[in-house]
Amino acid sequence: MSMSSSDSDEITASEEKQFVWNGLNFWYFWQDRVADLADDKKNNNRSFSQLLNGFHDERSLFDHLIFRQEDDFSWFIDDYEVHEAAQVGTSSSFGFRYGLAFEVGSTGANSDKIFGYVQYVVEDSPADRAGLKRGDIFRGIDGQDLTFLNYINLLSRDQYDLQMATVRLEGDAYRIENRDKTLQVVSETLTENPIHTVYVHDTGSNKVGYLLYNSFRLNFHEELNNQFGEFRDQGINELVLDLRYNGGGTLITSALLASMISGVSKESVFAELRYNSKRSSSSPPPFTFYENVPIYDDSRSFINADTKLISLGLSRVYILTSSRTASASETVINGLIPYGVEVVKIGTKTVGKDDGSITVYDAPGANYSPGANQRSMINQNHPRAMQPIVFKIVNANNQDYPDGFPPDITQSEFNHLEGGLPPLGDPEEHLFKAALAHIDGSLLAKEISVRDVDRTMYLMDSVELTPFHFDQYLIPSDLDRFSLEIE
């Protein structure tokens, strides 16, 4: 059959737009639900070019091709080098994390004024050196009150003077008053260790290990294993894993952490992944538990797997949760369920993100996700990349968690701002205190009494101002387990 003139025309759209379409057509989980990602769209080069050129730029094309009815978590990457640095914990940062809330909730007068409260501070960061501490309240930046209209702009600056404040609980809502104090913070490039806070608390009858773990980062595997070695050497028999600020990270690290907690055998399935119909026939084997620790450097390059994994072999673990606990954090919970490990969840309901992504580059010769030794395959003409959802995840019992995990014991630090927030890991810190009480038998699930501050006040967490906040992703070496051909 002869080829028509329209078929023989070259594709005239930019290489960035072609990359967006090709990468999503190949990998995207909902590819078969998006009409403009259908394979036959490329049958005619002229009409295909018209499709791509119907959008102002590659980002707007990406937004059009995402299946927003079910997908809240895919995003476009302007510069993949900045993105890769963030994945290993390096970014421009002030070194503190905060929550944002309206000054008055639905029970009071309408208000668009916003205040922030400090959740934690990174040691030796600009925020730490400025004197910020957990529980501090601020309501303005550079002389301007924070409002719903200006907070994104004000909080996006690289330097600011924080107007400090106090908070008072009136009825079911907070009232904010300025303090005669400002603190100046200037952002700088930081690498944050996800192992933020560690304590061992001796209750007399139990030794309780506490670990605030803030992200699943593969370049900190050795440090995580060493920490579990210290827990083992100190004889802990209960573990409180604080994931209230942990939005996810690498799936391999989630499997490692579950192995360190439980000691489930390496042959046992931790997680199985479900891909789109085009990839299902080439899906890799499931992720299993580990007995050795794969070590990676800060460039995400594999070094070795010679280190023996240290496991506590626990039959119970306490996990502190919040509405920001997501992805790889939830997979730890889900992956332990089939093996009889009791997971006591304290806090609030988790996000319910039971899917994951890969970084997709303009590098079809490397299946769109080249390894560290394949950088030359990436198109050097632009820095664009994508982080689309490419799989759903289930445990060994074929269970997922689209609605999140509700707590067994409800607690929220947002309810306790007036009295100040005790340091994380302190026995008086409200979520940890509930765990200690349950361990000692003085508190049973569902028995705790919590005063519920007006939840309509709460706006967001500072991490939600960045695109990379709720994720669970595969690394390039994970993709080596596929048998793939570019179509």
Image (cartoon, rainbow, N blue to C red):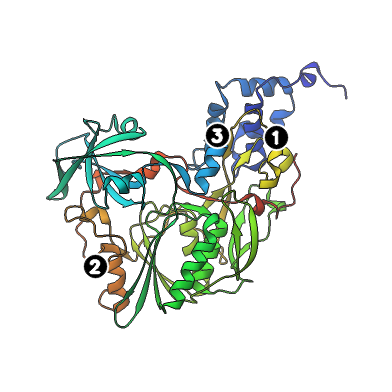
Q: Nearer the viewer, mark 1 or mark 2?
A: 2
Residue 150 in the image, given as x and y percentages of width and height: 29, 30
Q: Nearer the viewer, residue 259 or 300?
A: 300
- Residue 333 sits above or below residue 18 on the image: below
Q: Nearer the viewer, mark 3 or mark 1?
A: 3
Residue 2 in the image, given as x and y percentages of width and height: 87, 22
Which residue lies most toward the top here?
5
Quick check: marks 3 and 1 in contact, CB under 8 Å?
no
The answer to whether residue 334 of the structure is visible from this angle is no
Residue 135 in the image, given as x and y percentages of width and height: 24, 52
Amino acid type at mark 3? Asp
Which element is circle 2 on?
Answer: loop
The answer to whether residue 52 of the structure is visible from this angle is yes
Please tell me the numbered disc located at residue 448: 2
Residue 352 in the image, given as x and y percentages of width and height: 44, 53
Q: Which residue is mark 1?
A: 39
Which quadrant, please, contains the C terminus?
top right
* In this picture, residue 13 sits left or right of residue 423: right
Q: Nearer the viewer, residue 464 or 35?
A: 464
Earlier in the chain: of badge 2 and badge 3, it is: 3
Quick check: marks 1 and 2 in contact, CB under 8 Å?
no
Earlier in the chain: of badge 3 and badge 1, it is: 1
